[in-house]
Image: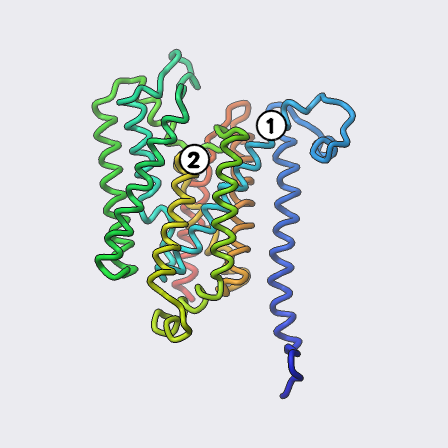
Amino acid sequence: MHFADGELPADYLKYTYRKVLWILGGIVALFLLLILSISVGAVTIPPYEVFLTLIGQNVTDKWDRIIWNIRLPQALTAIVCGAGLAVAGVAMQSILRNPLASPFTLGISNAGAFGAAVAIIFLGTGRMTSTTAGAVMINNPYLTTIVAFIFCMLATIAIITIAKVKASSPEVVILAGVALSSLFTAGVMFLQYFSDDAQLAAVVHWTFGDVGRAGWSEFYLMAGIVVLACIYFIANRWNYNAMDAGDETAKGLGVNVEQLRNVGMIVAALVTAVLVSFLGVIGFVGLVCPHMVRRIIGDEQRYLIPGSIVMGGILLLASDTVARLIVAPYVLPVAILTAFMGAPVFIYLLLRGYNR
């Protein structure tokens, strides 16, 4: 069968349109979920009034303070964090050619937790105001974030150095991440053992990942980093497709594999470090979302990367919404819910994959 110049087969167009429609449908679903997430909580706001408020058409300021100061930044932070962790995860899985790879495989989240523990215990950034529930406070969140970020980047530099010494072997990078994760986990346990009750409570409180602790200023910083990272990974989608076929094939197509792998690792680690240092440890999003999208639209990076970005936003926003309702009026940290959901879903995906 012959096709005219520039003409594509109808079956191929149908195949690609289906992927594009799925991504567009995910964006619409994400917007509707955003409206729903803002409307529910301790105070229920009608979704129609939420929409009018967001577009500036609501003539009353009845809900303005709740929507603009509390729920909207929290919901947008959940979307940005989910998208950032998901795009970092899908990039790592392609870079390392390992379906179990994710930013957390590199030990970055544990490094951030260790940095926060150092700030709380040695710099006094955490305290307990009373013996009642919810009385643990981080009285200097910016200093805690800075120290956590420093340790995140130290872990990243260590992994990049090891990768260069061993010629960027994917196996070596993953094993180095596992070793660093164990090292920083042991460090957190060591600090907790010698801390007092107030310090211990503050450390545990910080390690519970929670998107509700970010305000507008933190959101803008995280959003800027995540958007730039998404642009970088989408711009290199064809290179990642080539790397999926093997390093030799990619080199034959003119791809600088080592440079692409190292820069990709740095960008993914930077995204994870910023998110973890502001929000705490939120696991499984970067690990599960790419697998979920692969089951739906396949492995092609042109669609897998944007699809994972959308799915990450949906998953974390939905998790945060449920976390605010499941034990209302108390609000669960979203990391607890993602761990409960992510572990069985990931095991299911692994078993299903191996059965195939």
Describe residue 337's horizontal placement relative to residue 102 as left or right. right
Residue drawn at x 29%, y 54% is 174
- Local packing at callout 1 (Cα closer than 10 Å; few below 14, some 14-19, many 20+) is some
- Local packing at callout 2 (Cα closer than 10 Å; few below 14, some 14-19, many 20+) is some
272 in relation to 60, above or below: below
Looking at the picture, which amino acid does disc 2 mark?
Answer: Ile
Residue drawn at x 27%, y 43% is 181
- Numbered disc 1: secondary structure: loop
**Rendered location of residue 332, percent (x, y):** 48, 29
Looking at the picture, which amino acid does disc 1 mark?
Answer: Gly
Describe residue 229's horizontal placement relative to residue 2 as left or right. left
Quadrant placement of the C terminus: bottom left
53 in relation to 290, above or below: above
Describe residue 332's horizontal placement relative to residue 158 as left or right. right
> Can you identify the residue that label 1 sits on?
41
Residue 252 location, quadrant? bottom left
Callouts 1 and 2 close, C-beta under 8 Å = no
Quadrant placement of the N terminus: bottom right
> Can you identify the residue that label 2 sits on?
336
> Which residue is the extreme one toward the bottom?
1
Please tell me which residue lies in front, 352 or 182. 182
The CA span between labels 1 and 2 is 18 Å
